[in-house]
Each structure stands twice: as structure tokens, then as C-alpha cells.
Image (cartoon, rainbow, N blue to C red):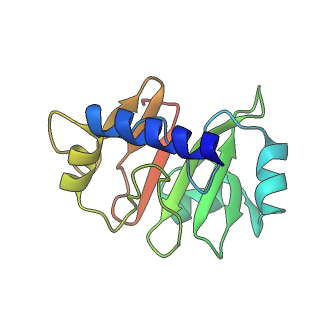
Amino acid sequence: MIYIKKLILCFMIVFVMGTGFVFAESVGGISLGMSKQDVLSAYGKPTRILSKAESRSLCGDPIGGWYYQKDGWLVTFNSDSGQVDRIVIFNNGTRRLDNSGLNCSSSLEEFAEKYGLSRVPRQGSIVSIDDGEYLVFFEYPNSLMFTIYNN
């Protein structure tokens, strides 16, 4: 118990002394690079496995993927590695970016503040939030994509 209290205290000191900016995101405990099995273990089978055409009509991007309709999010996997390469959260869902707490209802100014961006992102932009992690605002505020891709 004492060890846990000391660990929490160390974390609080580092956070207060640091910048307060949040990096290395996840959504619902799922991080980029996780396996299909990790997602299945955490959430079970998706509501639907979307075709590229279905995902295009849902989020504007022909990416396919596992759609969890109740929670309002889509997870896609790299075809070579099978690892999570995109997570799309929808404005009608319950999912948020875990570390920042932001979602499609958050303002663009909140994204700039939380991630220490030099300028406020625009609808249609892609911003780097950490090494190899990007937020894509192409369909914002209807959806927000968290991905390893910057194009």
C-alpha cells in the first residue's frame, strides 16, 4: 500500500513539474500497434466488420475495419502486421481519447491546448500529437481519427 502511494505521489510530482501536456494516446484502453487479439480480449466481437464502402459512408474514409456501434468507434488494422493502425471515434458515441479526455464534442482550441500545438487545428487538417501518432480532423466534428499515418 505504501509503495502504491509513493508511486502515485511520484506521478503527481512529475505531472506538476512537467508541461502538463498529454502524449501517447489510446482510446478505450486500445493503443495504436495493439493486436486484433488485444481488441477482441478487451471488447469482444465487433458489431460489424465494415467493408471499405461502408466505412466511407460512415466516416468519409474507405478503410474498412471493426465497428463497435454501441460505443461509436471503428478500429482498423494494418494489412501486413495485423496491428491497430487507426481508431475513429464518432460524435454519437461514448469514446474519447483516454489521456486527454477529448472527443468530437471538444473544441479545436481544446486540442491545441491539451497537446501543446503551436496553432489551432482546422477541420480537414492532420496534426502530430506524439512521435508516430496523429489526429486527423477530415470529418470533424462528425468523427475524429487517431492514427499512425500522416497522410
The residue that appears at 27% across and 49% down in the rendered structure is 111
Q: How many marks?
A: 0
Residue that extends furthest to the front in the rendered view of this protein: 2
The answer to which image quadrant residue 141 occupies is bottom left
Camera-side residue of 110 and 140? 110
- Picture coordinates of residue 6 (x, y %)? 53, 39
Establish if 12 lies above or below 28.
above
- Picture coordinates of residue 95 (x, y %)? 53, 64
The residue that appears at 64% across and 62% down in the rendered structure is 54
- Picture coordinates of residue 46 (x, y %)? 77, 64
The residue that appears at 45% across and 35% down in the rendered structure is 10
The answer to which image quadrant residue 44 occupies is bottom right
The answer to which image quadrant residue 18 occupies is top left
Establish if 78 lies above or below 53.
above
| Residue 19 seen | no
Establish if 1 lies above or below 19.
below
- Picture coordinates of residue 55 (x, y %)? 60, 58
Establish if 98 lies above or below 151.
below
Q: Quadrant of the C terminus?
A: top left
| Residue 4 seen | yes
The residue that appears at 47% across and 53% down in the rendered structure is 97
Residue that extends furthest to the left in the rendered view of this protein: 119
